[in-house]
Amino acid sequence: MAILLTTCGITPQATELQVMSFNIRWNNPDDGENAWPHRKQHVAGIIKNRGVDIVGLQEALIGQIEYLESALDDYAWFGIGRDDGEKAGEFTAIFYRKDRFDLLDEGTFWCSQTPDKPGFGWDAVCNRTATWGKFKDKNNGREFFLFNTHYDHVGKVAREKSARLLIERIKNLGDDTTVLVTGDFNCPPGSPPYKILTDAVLQDARLISVTDHQGPAGTFTGFNPKAEPSKPIDYIFVSPNVQVQTHAFIDQTFSGKLPSDHYPVLAKVRF
């Protein structure tokens, strides 16, 4: 005999979490005073001090990941290098609170015509990847997916095709699946890749937040703390069964310096 909990005034416990997308800028010595050794503790501090439960990183090299692994001892991570499928090149790594979530499955695919192996896609000038994980909330058993990606900064066709590939992968999970997507998409709202994503199964978390968006209007600064970017290129997208309670671009500085050339995106979501 089936018993509906809702008829007794009891509803299943919701999952509520802080999710972040953060392009941490690769470890480029030519960045001078903005190079990784001068800001790495601030990147780790933002993740830890903002109470982030799960974060998708972009542009992370293995040395940067190893530092964050040591600095964020409450987190586990996964991902692979885009250039060889192991440790070479940038990662679209995902860090998550290991006391909060069980990782049930994970993988990475390339944004290209051959998604199962390294290779440039279409008119891209770099290898580009999407890393995904299937998680279970230890508090209530609820499951969800997070996809994290970084689209090409030059190839217009590559960005559109990458968006279609991502949507195809998400649709294959089924209509009722809970999905979060983080990434640097290198395109503004209203652009073809953005429309492909939001016309299909995803919503821009910024636009559906219960409370007003907080922080600047855009996300890329080039390390200039006085920059006023007018549009985002970094996003958190969510499936229709996810409620967004708060949304912000974090413009925090440290002694007048930014922790990256992109503002991190932070959203409090509930499902």
Image (cartoon, helix red, strand yellow):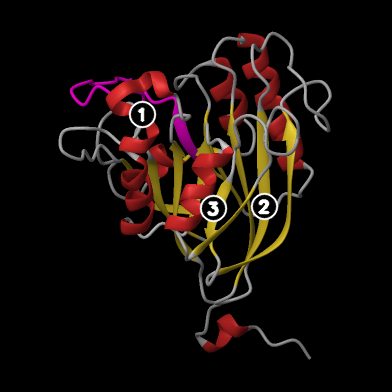
> Height in image: 27 above or below 103?
above
Range shown magenta: 220-236
- SS type, badge 1: loop
Three-letter code for the amino acid on which mark 3 is drawn: Phe
Dot 3, how many residues are within 10 Å of its Cα: few (below 14), some (14-19), or many (20+)? many
For the residues carrying marks 1 and 3, which lies nearer the camera in this image?
1
Marks 1 and 3 sit apart, C-alpha to C-alpha, by 22 Å
Marks 3 and 2 sit apart, C-alpha to C-alpha, by 10 Å
Q: Measuring 46% from the left and 30% from the top, which residue is drawn there?
A: 27
Circle 3 is placed at which residue position? 95
Mark identifier at residue 202: none
Residue 213 image offset from top left, x and y in percent = 29, 41
Mark identifier at residue 35: 1
Q: Nearer the viewer, residue 27 or 5?
A: 27
Q: Which of marks 1 and 3 is nearer the N terminus?
A: 1
Residue 145 image offset from top left, x and y in percent = 65, 53
